[in-house]
Amino acid sequence: MFEILSEKLNKVFRALSGKGKLSEKDIDDALRQVRLALLEADVNFKVVKDFTARVKERSLGAEVLRSLTPAQQIIKIVNEELIRTLGEGQSRLVSSSLPPSIAMMVGLQGSGKTTTSAKLALHLKHSGQRPLLVAADNRRPAAIEQLVTMGGQLDIPVYRETPDSDSKDICAHALIRAKELAVTWVIVDTAGRMHIDEPMMAELSQVKEQLKPAEVLLVVDAMTGQDAVRMAEEFNSRLGLTGLILTKMDGDARGGAALSIRWVSGVPIKFIGIGEKVDAFEPFYPDRLASRILGMGDVLTFIEKAEKTFDEQQVKELEKKVRTATFNLEDFLSQLREFKKMGPVAQLMEMLPGVSQLSRQLPAGMEEKQLKKVEAMILSMTLEERRNPSIIDGSRRRRIARGSGVKPQDINQLLNQFRQMQKLMKMGIGGKLPPNLAGMFR
Ligand SMILES: Nc1nc2c(ncn2[C@@H]2O[C@H](COP(=O)(O)OP(=O)(O)OP(=O)(O)O)[C@@H](O)[C@H]2O)c(=O)[nH]1
Ligand SMILES: [Mg+2]
């Protein structure tokens, strides 16, 4: 998601940066291209209109035209306005003053409610809460079993009844169970329909009335584009939502839903789902998504993820190396193994500044199966070669290739990829950007 948009915006900014001094016409042209790129990414036209109007007004202001680095100033403005469109800061879950807090999950069929209920429960458990899952989707027996299975795998209690029970009774009994178990959060998975209809809304309103939930969370499939946005408006006006969870953000949708939904519906995005597994779930940070879209990589998410795997000292070193783009092949090798513990490599690459563009240019990329090969190649190098790959000449290359069972061209490719990665990292975080702007992405 966001790749095409990200590429297009980067192209606009590169052209601007090459210009030095900017005229009003340069800014107009650039903003027209930004507008087109957003529309092509399926962003709601009203959001695009508001967004470009705000960027334009600020760009034509004295702060930009008089500055020594007008292009960078515009990128900064675009970044800030993107963040505003996405909802400013992080929107956290709100708990009720008396436990347990209740989160009611609503949404259309197949949007990911059941999966997301389990993901949310796991997230809460990891942050020290005691959750209870409630299978209030009594329309399909399979739905109850799905939740029970997931709860079992995560060691999280699930309250269920027989499929013929009434949702009102299920909720009432679930609250009694919640008290018995002394849980702090109750997550209620409700039934979805193919389309919004009167009986569904009536049932959901009734459940809401009965449970008085602290959170009413709409689960929407980001792959459905502007339909997701309309859905959010409709659910919000009928039910009153406290938050949105966008699922399937790992898909190949153009990103229009994610970029429009907050601005149009006024409801904050609280979490995103980024895969089918239960831990493919993250709090939503507008600033991180914005810098990801602008191709600056998501250093913060990367570092947070790293923190779960590395110890603090290692993290500090990695962070410094990623920031200053000084890590060499030796560091690369030692990170490679740690990388594997952190999750799917492609997903991690996506988060590193510069690397996301690189990995798109190189379809073979640094995917899992290639890692072994890369590891073998680096292992066949001497310490000196790893620290200073520029000394690797023809004869060294042949020796390394023989030692790792690959062709000399493979060594060349690795070295080229690595050089390019370092270059892009420099461009992305330090290098070309003036210090004030570089600081923004730290
Ligand atoms: N790739 C990806 N798949 C997801 C994500 N969230 C959910 N899914 C998948 O979407 C499908 C539907 O998920 P469910 O949780 O069963 O959806 P639901 O809203 O409960 O569906 P109903 O109970 O039929 O209304 C499943 O195959 C999930 O694995 C996500 O973030 N990424
Ligand atoms: Mg379900």
Image (cartoon, rainbow, N blue to C red):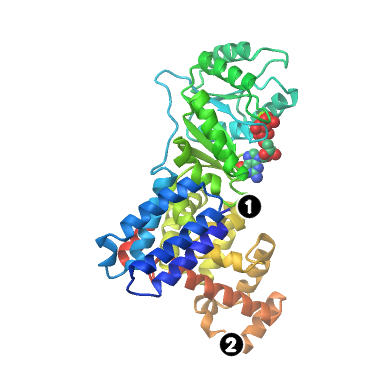
- Amino acid marked by disc 2: Asp
- Disc 1 beta carbon < 8 A from ligand 1? no
Q: Residues within 10 Å of mark 1 (few under 14, many from 20)?
A: few
What amino acid type should be assigned to the residue bearing mark 1? Answer: Asp
**Disc 1 versus disc 2: distance between alpha carbons?**
41 Å
Which numbered disc covers residue 393?
2
Q: Circle 1 sits in a helix, a strand or a loop, which is it?
A: loop
**Disc assigned to residue 252:** 1
Q: Earlier in the sequence, mark 1 or mark 2?
A: 1
Q: Identify which residue is drawn at 56% across, 31% down.
A: 121
Which mark's residue is nearer the viewer, 1 or 2? 1
Residue 125 x %, y %: 52, 32
Decide if ligand 1 comes within 8 Å of the CB at mark 2: no
Report whether 262 appears left or right of 433.
right
Q: Is residue 326 visible?
A: no
Q: Quadrant of residue 396?
A: bottom right
Residue closer to the observer: 167 or 185:
167
**Residue 407, x across and y down, in percent:** 71, 79
Q: Residue 416's spot in the image, x, y percent?
A: 58, 77
